[in-house]
Image (spheres, grey):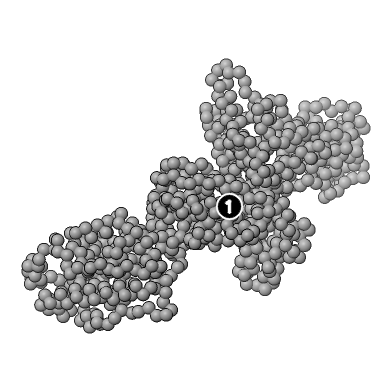
Amino acid sequence: MRKALAVAGSAPPQPGHDQPADRYLWDRLGHLEQRIRAAVRERRAGDPDPDDPYRGQYLTPEAVERILAAPAMVGRAGGGLGEPPAPPPGSRTARLAEAFGLLPIDLELLLVALAPDLDTRFERLYGYLNDDLTLRRPTIGLALELCGLPGAGPGRFRFSAHAPLIAGGLLEITEPERPLLSRGLRVPDRVTARLLGDDEVDGALRGLVRVGTGTGAGGEDGAGGLTGTARRLRAAAATGSGLVYLLDRSGTAGPEAVAALAGGGRRPLVVDVAALAARPTDEAVRALVPLVREARLGGGGVVLGPLDRLAPERPERAGLLRELCARLAGVPLIVHGSPAWEPGWAAESPVVLAVPPPDPRERAERWARVVRGAVRGAAGGSGGEEAGGAAAGGSVGRSAGGSGDGEPVPSAELAEVLAPYRLDEDQLARAADVAARTAAAERRPVRAEDLRAAVRAQNGAGLARLARRIEPAVGWGDLVLPETTSRQLRELALRARHRDQVLGQWRMRPGGGRGRGVIALFAGESGTGKTMSAEVVAAELGMELYVVDLSSVVDKYIGETEKNLERIFTEASQVNGVLLFDEADAIFGKRSQVKDAHDRHANVESAYLLQRMESFDGIAILTTNLRANLDEAFTRRLDVIAEFPVPDEAQRHALWDRCLGSWIPRGDDLDLAFCARRFELAGGSIRSCAVTAAYLAAATGRPLEMAQLVSAVAQEYRKLGRLVLAGEFGEWLPG
C-alpha cells in the first residue's frame, strides 16, 4: 500500500492526438483523483499504523474502538462535490448522458466506477479506501462518499434496478448478497471501449446482431435519395416511442428499414430473428440488455424481422417482444413481418406502414446487387487466381447453354428467372452466397440453375413433415398433351411469375382479405398426366413439388382436419414450392343438405377450405378425376382449370415412344403404330405396360419384341378389369 500512495501524486494519463476519447473524460478523472487524495489523507490521519502490510486482512481491538467512536454516517454528506461541469456538446460523454438520460451526479458515479479501467493506480487506492485489499473496485458506499453524498441519502437510489445507470446496463453491481453500500461497482468493457472511441458492436451480440450498410435494395431511388416508403419510415421512427411496424408481404421491408435509419443518421442494428428465436426465452431476455445498450451507445436504431420467425403467437415470445419494445422506448425500433400487429405485443401501439411490392425491375436489380456482392466475396475467399478470374467483376453467367463466358445476365432475363420466388432479406443473402460459392467451386460464373437450387435450399423442413417432397426431374418435353392443355399449364406458370406485378403493383387483387396465391385444378381420368404435369410446372418455376398426404390430413375427430390443413397452408406459404392436393375431391367435395351432425361438420370443413384458399399466398394445384364432385364455390376461386382428356391415337403413339425411351433395345417386329391404334390406354397405363415389357425383355436377354409388349398390355387390361378381345389384339391375341 505504501507504493500505491507513493505514486498517487502523479497525474492521470492524458489522451494523445491519436486517442479519440474526449478531453472532458480525462479532466473529470483528474478531479476524481484529487478527491481520492483527500479521502486517503483523511483516512491516514486517523490510522495509527498506515504502513501495516497486513492492513485490511484483520480487525484489531483498537480499530473496533475507532469505528465505534466515529460519527454516524446517516445524514453525513462528506466534503460536498459541488455542481460538476456539463460535458461539452457533441462529445462522447455528452452523447452518452443524453442517450441514457443521465444526471450530472450519474456521470460522476459512473466515472468513479470507470477509473480502475483507465488507470490501474485506482485499484490499489480503492483497496486502501475500502479497507480490504481484495476490493479493488469501488463499492456503492465509497462511490457515494467520493461524490459527497450520504450513504443513507437519496443518492443510493441512483443504483436501483430502474435507475438509468443500472437499467441502461452502464453499471453492473457485483456481490448482491452483501449490504447495499458494500456491493461492488463495475463498468462493462463495452461502455469503456465506447467512451475511448471504439465503435465496434458488443462482442456479446456476435451472431445475433449485425450493422446494416444502408445500401440495400429499395433504399435509394434513381435520384440518389430515399424511396417514398423509406422517407415515411424515417419520419415515423422519429416520433413518440420510435416504434414502427412494417406490414410486409413481399420480403423487402428489411432493406427499407435499414435505409431509413441510415438516411436519418442512425446506425442500423439488424437483429437475426432466427438466432434470437433459437435461444431459450430466459437467455434471449438477457441478450436484450447488451442490445439495448448498444443501440443507445451508438445512437442507432434496431431492425427486427421478419416477425413471423419469432412466433409472437406464443406467450413467451410475445413477452420477449414486449420487453424489447419497453426497453427501447425512445429509440427507433422498426419491426417488419406479414401478420397483423397485435396490441398486446407492446405497451404502445406502433405506427403501421404497408410496404408495396417492388416492381420487376427493382426485384432484378436487388437480386443482381446481392448476387454480385456474394460472387465477389466467394472469389476473394477462394484464394485461387483461377476461381477469382472466373467470377471476376461479379458476373452472373447465362443459364441458356451454360456457356460460362462470364457475360452478365440481362436484367430482363434475371427478372424472368427469379420472379416466382418470394424471399426476405436474409433468405436472399443466403441463397446468393450459396449460388456464388457453388459457382466458385467449379471455377465458372453463376448460372440461373445455381440460383434456383440455392433458393430451394432455403425451404424449411416444416412442410416436408406434412407432405411428400419431390425434386422435379421432368420437363415440357416429357409431356404429351393436347395444345389446349399445354397452353393452360403455361398460363399457370405465367401467373405464378407475374402475380406480384399484377396483383400487387397493378392492384388487380380485389378486397376481402384475398391472398396472392395461384390455384389451379387439373381434371381428367386417372393416368392422363395430371401429377406429372404438376411436376413439370414446378420444374418450370424452379421449385419443389409437395404432395399432400391425405392420410395425414383427414381426421375422424371434429375440427382436427381443419387444424391439419391450416398447418399445411401455413408452412406452404413460407416456402418456395408448389403444393399438390392429389385426389382433391376427397376434401374439397360438395356441401350437402344438413340432416345430422356429420353433415354439419362436413359443411363446416368445406366452408373453412373455401375461406383458406382465398387467403392463401402460395401456389396450389388440385387434381381430380371426378370434377363433378367438387363444390362449385371452389371452381369460382380457381385461377386455371386444365382438362386432361384421354389421349388420341397420335398422342398414344408418342407416349409409347417416350415411355420406351432410347436405352432399351427394340426388336425389328415392334409395331408402336399398332399399339397406338388398337389399345385405348391413358398415359399412366402405357407407362406401366412399357415397364412390364422391359422386365420381360430383360429376362430373355434379347431386344424387346412385339409379343412381350402385347403380353404386358394384356396384363394391364386385366388390372383395369377390361376384356382381352380379339378385335383389339388381332394376331397378337395371347393364348
**Viewport quadrant of the N terminus:** bottom left
The answer to which quarter of the image holds residue 672 is top right
Residue at position x 60%, y 69% in the image: 381
* Residue 40 in the image, given as x and y percentages of width and height: 19, 75
The part of the image, by quadrant, that contains residue 518 is top right
Farthest residue in the top direction? Answer: 595
> Which residue position is annotated with label 1?
228
What's the residue at 67%, 70% (across, down)?
A: 388
Query: Element type at marker 1?
Result: helix
Is 494 left, or right, of 661 in this rendering?
Answer: left
Left/right of residue 356 with respect to residue 61 in the rendered view? right
Along the viewing direction, whichever of 651 and 345 lies nearer the viewer: 345
Image side of residue 313 versus residue 561, left or right: left
Which residue lies at the image location 82% right of the left edge and 46% below the top edge? 661
Estimate the x, y position of residue 430 in percent, counting from the top left: 59, 57
Residue 670 screen position, x and y as percent: 90, 42
Amino acid type assigned to the residue bearing label 1 in the image: Gly
Instruction: Say if 557 sits above or below 390 in the image.
Output: above
Relative to 690, residue 47 above or below: below
Kindly indicate the quadrant of the structure image that contains residue 134.
bottom left
Q: Position of residue 676 (x, y in %)?
A: 87, 36
